[in-house]
Amino acid sequence: QYEGKVAEAVALVDTLQNWMVIDKIIIPTKNPNKKFVFGKGNFQVLTEKIKKLPHVTAVFLNVERISSLTKKELEGAWGMPVFDRYTVVLHIFRCNARTKEAKLQVALAEVPLLRSNLKNEVSQRDQQRGGSRYIMGSGETFLETQNRVLKERELKIRNALEKLRRKRALLRTQRRKCEFPMVSVMGYTNCGKTTLIKALTGEAGLQPRDQLFATLDITAHAGCLPSHMPVIYVDTIGFLTDLPHNLVESFSATLEEVAYSDLIVHVRDITHPETILQKATVLSVLRNLNLPSHLLDSMVEVHNKVDLIERYKPTEENALAVSALHGHGLEELKQEIEKKILTATGKKILTVNINLEGPQLSWLYKEATVQEVEVMPEDSTARVKVIIGSSAFGRYKNLFPNSEIFMS
């Protein structure tokens, strides 16, 4: 278990350009909120180890969050910056944020960090000057002024995010009108979500990267299911064990898109030694998002990277074995997605008899997904196989009450 945590910590550092792990050590930690994370003996062992490594410029403690007091004490003892999971992941997010929304969400996640740094700075000032000082003529202490500035900054960011959220809600409504089914592809970070979407859609522009948190934004990609039904695959931010709660909170605007999808595909890197723990992490985050229960119940589980395991057979019932890189198992996955989408959206596959001289065929092409047209030239009719949404089906029956309909 510890080896897996160390490997992930190394992978986090390796994700950052010009950052490199020089050495690693496993030491038991006490409560991370106490003044020192370690017992005295372990602290000494660690301090001596750091002093013997001349090229070390920072220390990464693989704990969720250390208090500003602990950070100050450790940095004072070791003479270099000390990072926890929160600050390292935040830095990765900062480097990978491409869109305005991702940058705003990173800025929002930075606010708690700036607050705790501020407390640290104020306590140092007080020690040096012997008591707090008011800023000239304002009746405000330095801490009060800085806190007010931070509050205003947080409010501005939240308002800007709210505007973007409303804009996205509008786009979502437009998509709903087109009745495109939406499939959210989720999973632990670096499990192969983007590679899978590229394989399902054939979108050449998608460039998956073998690193943690390569995707920070929600991106939508058009695909096609076996019955020629168009579908939108949504690529989402990856999850991580012990990802601090307010970091997930900052990205709730991105994750809320998932609640509006018709289906969730949960991708797992089945070769990873911690794959079971990773699954538990993803399911726990999904449950905390307050998603509709039908979305959690209908979820499709994909075991990815099976090309790296000889004769792999999923032990979980209903899980699908796939190699997104080599295309193995994709047809079965598409069929499963289609089956679940038809159930979730209430779409039907029908065959209708139409008169070719009437407007039915052009209406069906516009309002439904036409799969096959079998023309009977002798009486100017055709049998048309379509996938049609329930509202469009209702309109069709009202417009063409005499049309013959056969359920598939």
Image (tube, rainbow, N blue to C red):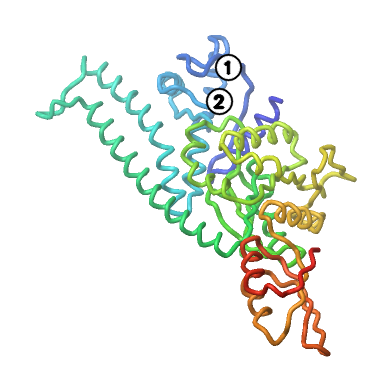
x and y percent of residue 229 in the render?
A: 70, 65
- Residue position marked by numbered label 1 in the rendering: 29
Classify mark 2: helix, strand or loop: loop
x and y percent of residue 68 in the render?
A: 41, 23
- Residue position marked by numbered label 2 in the rendering: 63
Which residue does the image show at 51% across and 47% down from the upper left?
Answer: 254
How far apart, in angstroms, are the residues tagged by discs 2 and 1? Answer: 9 Å
Location of residue 191 by image quarter: top right
Residue 57's place in the image compared with 49, above or below, is below
Circles 2 and 1: CB atoms closer than 8 Å: yes
Which residue does the image show at 31% across and 40% down from the upper left?
Answer: 153
Q: Which label is found at residue 204?
A: none
x and y percent of residue 20 in the render?
A: 57, 39
Residue 109's place in the image compared with 390, above or below, is above
Residue type, mark 1 in image: Thr
Of residues 185 and 58, which is closer to you in this image?
185
Which residue does the image show at 75% across and 54% down from the upper left?
Answer: 324
Is 65 placed left or right of 240 in the picture? left
Of residues 273 and 72, which is closer to you in this image?
273
Classify mark 1: helix, strand or loop: loop
Is 47 placed left or right of 357 in the picture? left
Residue type, mark 2 in image: Val
